[in-house]
Amino acid sequence: MIRIDRLRYRYRAAQPLALDGVSLDIERGGIYGLLGPNGAGKTTLISLLAGLLAPQDGGITIDGEPLAVWRAVHPAAIALVPQDYAFYPMLTVAENLAFFAGVQGLPRRQRQENCAEAMAFACLEAVAGRRAGELSGGLRRRLNLAIGLTGAPEVLLLDEPTVGVDPQSRRFMLDAVKRFAAAGRTVLYTSHYMDEVEAVCADVAIIDHGKVLTAGTLADVRRGGASALRLTLVRPLPEALAADWRARFPAMTATDNRVDFPGLASDGLAPLLTELAAAGVAVEHVAYGAPNLEQVFMRLTHHSLRD
């Protein structure tokens, strides 16, 4: 188990805490979703787990041992796959894998075996001789993943691994993550795509302003939110009605033809339908019940825009 215990971190004395008492338990052999708006503290937490930063207060243990001690015994066991491309564009796919396996100090035979396994896992054999800078966005993401696997890690830290890829590549990445975890290894998965997290993660945490807002199984986190109403309309909500509803229902969100009302009581539906009819907007679909992960996320983070 990875145990994060009351972790605090501040970059500069005058700045607010990037992490303010974060505590999480991440079970081995699963995919744990870490969610939060920009600036919530996700990257700081990942950097601490990867050993790029040192804890200032609180601690991280793996299987009961302090992270630094555990990493000293298992130096390649935690791998970070960052959101940015982390390879050399002038090197070929094979050369990039060989380089990153080499800097980990692995014996030559093990380096060769690990590179072959990583290339096969990411299905990169057909482009092994191509320069990384010439690859498509989906292939670049797969190369990023393969580089993270060259040390045969037990814990994989994935930071927005599907940004900018086509649907087929996105599906491949999600399936690859599930295959990795199915072998008994652990994934910490951060993404702004809530449907991805719901598709692959059994446990999730939502953090903001350096604090944990909620954590637990995906089902428990969703059940923790109040019932929600979703209206799917035949056309976007008229601006005048949208402004009126935002004033009356601060938690409401309207995106394209979809309107969500987190926490709305069931008897509030009929008046809304009446107002839509008066505005000449037909309703295509009505859904009421437990909120999805996106609705819980928006409610807890208060819908504020983050840069």
Image: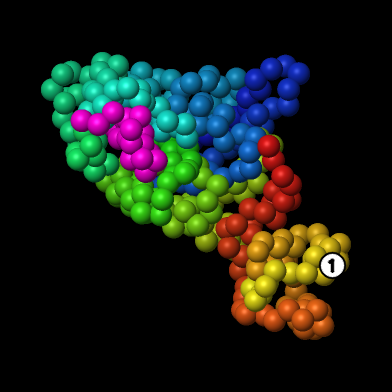
Q: Amino acid at mark 1?
A: Ala
Residue 195 vs residue 222, the one in the foreground = 195
Front one among 183 and 195: 195
On the question of residue 144 being in view, the answer is yes
Residue extending farthest to the left is: 109
Q: Residues within 10 Å of mark 1 (few under 14, many from 20)?
A: few
- The percent position of residue 257, horizontal first and vertical second, equals 65, 68
Residue shown at 80% from the left, 65% from the top = 239
Residue 208 is drawn in which quadrant? top right
Residue shown at 57% from the left, 29% from the top:
44
**Residue 273 picture location, percent across and down:** 76, 81
The answer to whether 4 appears left or right of 302 in the picture is left
Magenta residues (range): 129-152
Percent position (x, y) of residue 267?
Answer: 77, 80
Location of mark 1 (residue): 240
Quadrant placement of the C terminus:
top right
